[in-house]
Amino acid sequence: MVIDRIMGKGDLEGGIATPEGLTPPFQGAVLCHPHPALGGNMENPVIMALARSLDGAGIATIRFNFRGVGDSQGTFSQGTEE
């Protein structure tokens, strides 16, 4: 799923999960994966465990891959444009 086209730098791959049986508005959290240079991505086991736990608590989540990771477009710029 493409979640956004940001600042002309291309699409970011991501996922949004909303708790079943709840209607908006509800709480939400943005989950950012470990550093991409160390192999981090939105499918990281810690990120997935957090997403499941928050879902069970009735909290929506959004997780995404940084630029150049997975199907996100662009390249890592050593932090200058991230």
Image (cartoon, grey):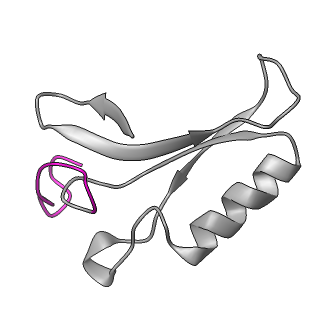
Residue visible at 49% across and 67% down in the picture: 43
- Locate residue 7 relative to residue 29 in the image: left or right: left
Q: Residue furthest bottom?
A: 38
Quadrant placement of the N terminus: top left
> In the image, residue 74 lies at what x, y percent?
11, 50
Tell me which secondary structure the magenta stretch mostly adopts. loop
Give the answer, above or below, for where 57 lies relative to 38. above
Q: Which residues are magenta?
A: 70-82
**Residue drawn 40% across and 67% down?**
41
In percent of the image, x 25 and y 77: which residue is there?
37
Q: Nearer the viewer, residue 49 or 80?
A: 49
Query: Is 19 placed left or right of 50 in the picture?
Result: right
Closer-to-camera residue (16/33): 16
In the rendered image, residue 9, in percent from the top left (x then y), is placed at 12, 37
Point out residue 78 in the picture as x, y percentages from the top left corner.
15, 64
Q: Residue at x 86, y 26 (%)?
A: 22
Image location of residue 56, percent across then percent down = 86, 51
Q: Residue 38's quadrant in the figure?
A: bottom left
**How many labels were placed on the picture?**
0
Q: Is residue 31 magenta?
A: no
Q: Magenta includes 73?
A: yes
Is 25 placed left or right of 36 in the picture? right
Q: Is residue 31 left or right of residue 67?
A: right
